[in-house]
Image (tube, rainbow, N blue to C red):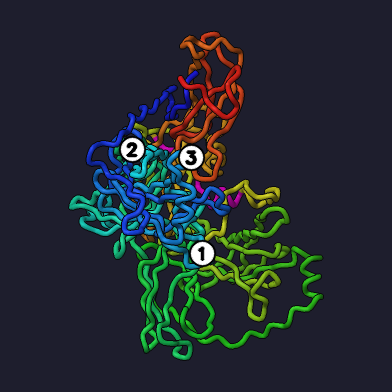
Amino acid sequence: MTRPSPVLMTSLALTWLLVSLPAVQAQPGAPTMAKFENDVLVIRGVAKTQSGQPLANATLFLFDLPDAQFGLKLGDRNKVTTDAEGNFAWTVPTDLRRDVEAYTRPEDEVPKCFALPLEPGTAAVPTKSFSHEGPDWRRRVLEDLALRCQTKWLTRDKNRLLSVVAPDRGRAEIKLRDPAGQPLANKAVLIEVLGLNSDYAGATVFQGKTDLSGRLVWQGYSGSRQLSIKVPGVGFGTSGHFELLPDRLVSVSMPALAPFSQVSGTVDTGLLKPGSVVHAADYSGREKWYNPSAVVDAQGHFSLEGLVPGERRLVLEGGTVSGSVTVNLAPGEKKNGVVFAAAPPRAVAPRELAEILKAVRQPTSVRVRGRVTNAQGAGVGGIEVFAVCTFNGGIRSSQEILNTTTDPNGNYVIENLHRGGVSLVAFQPTGPVALGMASPALGQFTDDFAEDLRGDLVLPAAHNSLKIKVLREGRPVPGATVRLTPQSGTGLYPFNIFGSSPEPAEARFRNMLTPIQKTDEQGEAVFDDLTPGRWDILASTVDANYLDDLARGGWIPDEPPTASNIASTVDVQSGQSSAFSLNIFPATGDVAFQVEAPDGTALNSNQVLFEYGPAVAQPNISPTLTTRVQLSPSGLGNYRVGKPGLWRIGARFGDTPGDKYVEP
């Protein structure tokens, strides 16, 4: 029987065997561990890759108590950096020395080690979300990227030397261009890995610098990745999903960066205090670490730069209490005249028991009203307005979608909504959609007890177009399905994940908000009149219904087996036309394997217990799934894992111990 081996899912059955790690021996002149140096405990060691090469310039986190209740204890106190030869030395803090001595005995106990790979010239900075509270944020933002290493003692005497072998890692080459399409030479770059579970607490931000050609190399562990790029003073962008392969350099395609937005205005001098600042307080979960701010001068003026476009709620900190200001920004927009004014006290009645009982007995008593206008402020009639309400459905969150049409003056009312957050979307026959959020009307409670909501919308005037070119191996793909979805301003979550049944307006709303087109003979699909902002792109060689399954976490369903797809991001600017090319990749999910008996012959068994899981397992998450697979008389098996990437597989049969694999 074969030991589990990484498998790269392609349209062909391709098995990728890991190269066995050569035995690591202590060499003359190698670093040693002196138990005490001037009464200081120091652990020395050498770190290598899976192929036996030195793990240079890597950040290691050493030691974790075996009974730790809250996961990994990663932080500056147990962090070391390897040199060019992979050597390191950790000076154990005084208050940890007793635990380290107790749990690192030479005869059997080895310190745990977690590694964060770094490209030379790149730094990794844990950055806290401005809204997160609690002392564990640093661990949370590191544990998704710093993975467990193999550790063992190379020598067991008093001069102990620790061997560290890191998981497979790869490198990505990124070429960055400014909004005008020119290479970004010698620019500082901030990189965030998207799709991690810890984004609510902050992010591990990689800091690097481009070369003269705008090229930057980023290093990470093998697996599927997507990067968010920010270049201070220039712009931002998002890569498509790409696969990092062990000891390989992959080239990542990036569109030209979109420019940041800027807001300037004044603060009422009655609200000012020394050190007052203005910042945006409502970034999405994956951007909460990014918190640009502007200091308010003595005259109350401020200019806030570096904003990611979309609907942004600006707040004043360091001053007296004031209401927030909400702005909707397009890429590169410079909005002036924003004012923080001293608001009069709101006439809010005390919450009596009757109000609470009414909220329980009448959960759908909320209404939203507002007015839809054009860019000149005139009301526009006949505009279809959708209210998207996300509310607490008991066990899980639910979502409902109701709609109406504006009267000749542009006014509308939507009633019988649940108590919760309400997003608004207005569609015009020709032109971009308008996005916004409803807020409590004057005199209403600002929490879930508010029944009267207000939401005014302004229809964007500028027209634009976006041309998507779909390629496979550099060749156009005619007949591919392309869907666009706006990233911000809608308050929406992926479709089909809520507990409520579909509303009558949902299908129409989905078709209008997430346009779908087929590519022509040149592999191109053109979308007109998109709302300025950030859009997700999803392309596939199958029909549009299949894309709904891809949107739910990126998992590929069992049928059809020949789909090709990729998700990416593009930024649409007001009044401009742009083009974007993306490559789709085979994603069949099929893997063929052969199981051999201990003597090397084909296994003559009807069924085996088949185990599979990602080749790079996340901390504290079980990496293995199990099922039964039918084998052919020659020991051949076939299984559809369901998601592209690097996988580790294995099989159990006969009297194989339940917790071990048979060695080949």
Q: Which disc, if any, is residue 545? A: none
Horizontally, is 539 left or right of 355 in the view? left
Q: Is residue 349 above or below residue 518?
A: below
Amino acid type of the residue that numbered disc 3 sits on in the rendered structure:
Ala
Q: How dense is the environment of label 2, judged by Cα within 10 Å: few (below 14), some, or many (20 and up)?
A: many
Q: Nearer the viewer, mark 2 or mark 3?
A: 2
Name the residue carrying label 1: 135
Question: Label 3's element?
Answer: loop
Q: Residue at x 19, y 50 (%)?
A: 213
Q: Is residue 239 visible?
A: yes
Task: Answer above or below: position of 37 versus 240.
Answer: below
Which one is nearer the viewer's eye here, 96 or 86? 96
Task: Determine whether, in the image, residue 637 is placed left or right of residue 29.
Answer: right
The residue lying furthest to the bottom in this view is 270
On the image, the x and y values in percent for residue 147 come to 43, 45
Q: Which of marks 2 and 1 precedes in the sequence?
A: 2
Residue type marked 2:
Thr
- Mark 2 = which residue? 49
Instruction: State the CA–CA distance, disc 1 to disc 3.
Output: 25 Å
Q: In the rendered view, would you say 345 is above or below 483?
A: below
